[in-house]
Image (cartoon, grey):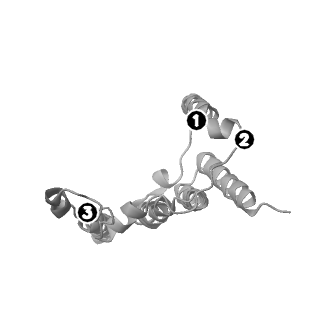
């Protein structure tokens, strides 16, 4: 009988690691961004499998749906030839290998150090682990009802306003990138027209 949970875990893990390696190997920034979107989406799938629904949703909304879109649009709108394609030197590869290997060693030691993982047992997560934080993002505090102190209970508010501020911030950055790209194009057109007139 197929254990679908393990199957999807291995599938998402392979996709995430494979596309992460593709990000490192690729020399084109646009392709790097696309590979990184796929890798981050696979990580979101791992969060959903672990029962961390809120973390998975934030991974999709902020990283995949926000930051990566800004990166792709920024490269497409403002990138020039030398910046779209990158060449990595030998010293940079050695430094990256040292840093990446050190991080891998720390992560492996942490994974082996968890007792439930080292003895082969697993803890089933029957319900989402971030319900209170997720509800706080839409303005409702489910932990407010359990607070005995009336002063503290009255001051407990949700996180809807900061969440909206982050959303507006991402929008402003995207508009700023588009504006800068248009300004550069206008300067380029004026220079070409001046050269043609001369």
Real-space Cα separation, disc 2 to disc 1, in angstroms: 18 Å
Relative image position of residue 81 (x, y in whole percent): 48, 56
Q: What is the quadrant of the N terminus in the image? A: bottom right
Relative image position of residue 196 (x, y in whole percent): 32, 70
Query: Relative to 121, is 70 above or below?
Result: below
Q: Earlier in the sequence, mark 3 or mark 2?
A: 2
Residue at the image position 54 percent from the left and 31 percent from the top = 99
Q: Nearer the viewer, residue 32 or 60?
A: 60
* Residue hosting label 2: 120
Is mark 1 in CB contact (under 8 Å) with mark 3?
no
* Residue hosting label 1: 107
For mark 3, give the secondary structure: helix
Query: Relative to 93, is 32 above or below?
Result: below
For mark 2, give the secondary structure: loop
**Residue lying furthest right:** 1
Residue at the image position 70 percent from the left and 53 percent from the top = 14
Q: Which of the 4 image quadrants contains residue 149?
A: bottom left
Mark closer to the observer (3, 2)? 2
Relative to residue 5, is residue 77 drawn left or right? left
Relative to residue 110, is residue 11 drawn left or right? right
* Residue hosting label 3: 162
């Amino acid at each position: 009988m197929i254990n679908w949970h393990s199957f999807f875990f291995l599938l998402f893990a392979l996709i995430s690691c494979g596309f992460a390696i593709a990000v490192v190997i690729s020399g084109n920034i646009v392709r790097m961004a696309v590979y990184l979107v796929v890798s981050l989406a696979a990580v979101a799938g791992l969060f959903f499998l672990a029962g961390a629904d809120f973390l998975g949703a934030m991974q999709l909304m902020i990283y995949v749906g926000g930051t990566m879109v800004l990166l792709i649009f920024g490269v497409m709108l403002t990138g020039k030839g030398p910046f779209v394609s990158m060449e990595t030197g030998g010293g940079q590869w050695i430094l990256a290998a040292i840093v990446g290997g050190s991080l891998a060693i720390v992560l492996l030691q942490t994974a082996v150090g968890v007792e439930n993982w080292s003895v082969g047992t697993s803890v089933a997560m029957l319900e989402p682990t971030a319900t209170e934080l997720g509800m706080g993002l839409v303005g409702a505090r489910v932990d407010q009802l359990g607070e005995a102190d009336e002063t503290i209970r009255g001051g407990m508010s949700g996180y809807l306003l900061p969440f909206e501020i982050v959303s507006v911030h991402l929008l402003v950055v995207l508009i700023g990138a588009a504006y800068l790209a248009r300004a550069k194009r206008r300067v380029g057109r004026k220079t070409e027209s001046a050269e043609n007139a001369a």
